[in-house]
Amino acid sequence: MNSFHYHRANSLSEAAQRLSANDQARLLAGGMTLIPSLKHRLLAVSELIDVARLPDLQEIRVDTAAVWVGAAVRHHQVASHAELARAQPALAELAGLIGDPQVRSRGTLGGSIAN
């Protein structure tokens, strides 16, 4: 694995600013694909920007008009969210079928979309 700078973002705007300032930077939340790619030198980055703990990206919200699932929400959270399962049963079911329990506990919806 090549060396890189690790930065834990304190806000979405900070993460966006750092990402736009460095075309070799990547966002990190679950890391299920990103970390193995770095280990096997399939990808080189100069900076990892950790967004896993940003509250805005960890939310699941369901109302009558829309469903919001943050990019850092883990697959197991999507699969086990009762209100989301009522509103979008296919999404909740699919999240429960992704990988194995270890993958569902670490992998994020945003990471799956990004890959």
Image (cartoon, rainbow, N blue to C red):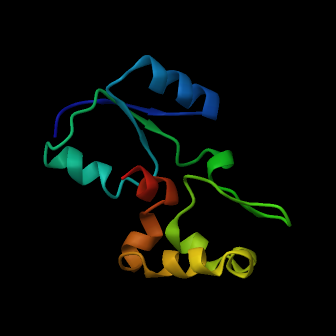
Viewer-proximal residue, 36 or 61? 61
Compared with residue 37, is residue 22 higher up or lower down, i.e. above or below? above
Q: As drawn, which residue projects farthest toward the front?
A: 65
> Picture coordinates of residue 98 (x, y %)?
41, 75
> Picture coordinates of residue 53 (x, y %)?
58, 47
Would you say residue 99 is visible in this rendering? Answer: yes
Tell me the residue at 62%/44% (across/down): 54
> Picture coordinates of residue 65 (x, y %)?
83, 61
Tell me the residue at 59%/71% (across/down): 78
> Picture coordinates of residue 50 (x, y %)?
47, 40
Would you say residue 11 is visible in this rendering? Answer: no
Q: As drawn, which residue projects farthest toward the top?
A: 21
Total label count?
0
Image quadrant of residue 23? top left
Tell me the residue at 69%/57% (across/down): 59
Compared with residue 17, is residue 61 higher up or lower down, i.e. above or below? below
43 relative to 24 in the view: left or right: left
Image quadrant of residue 1? top left
Viewer-proximal residue, 115 or 4? 115
Image quadrant of residue 2? top left
Compared with residue 87, is residue 58 higher up or lower down, i.e. above or below? above
